[in-house]
Image: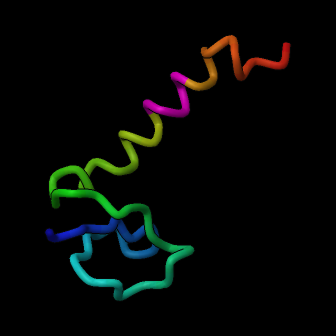
Amino acid sequence: MAEYWYCLKHGTVEDTELCQGADRMGPYPSREQAQHALESAAQKTEAWDKDPRWNDD
């Protein structure tokens, strides 16, 4: 099964581990999911920010 990573440093999708792990998000099961890594992370962060189980207020 192929895996894909989103490289934060270069803004590209990789199908091999070219960049350092600290610069990558993933792995993702498809190239398309890796291409949307930043949007997916932003959506998850917003959901967690609104989750009362994680809200310290």
Residue at image coords 52%, 22%: 47
- Residue interval drawn in magenta: 43-47
| Quarter holding residue 50 | top right
**For the view shown, which residue lies furthest in the front direction?**
1
| Quarter holding residue 18 | bottom left
Drawn side of residue 40 relative to residue 30, left or right = right
Drawn side of residue 20 relative to residue 28, left or right = right
Drawn side of residue 39 relative to residue 41, left or right = left
Question: Residue 19, position in %: x, y?
Answer: 42, 85
**For the view shown, which residue lies furthest in the right direction?**
57
Magenta span: predominant SS is helix
Residue at image coords 32%, 68%: 5
The vertical placement of 55 against 26, above or below, is above
Q: Quadrant of the N terminus?
A: bottom left
Question: Residue 51, position in %: x, y?
Answer: 62, 15
Question: Residue 2, position in %: x, y?
Answer: 16, 70
The vertical placement of 33 against 53, above or below, is below
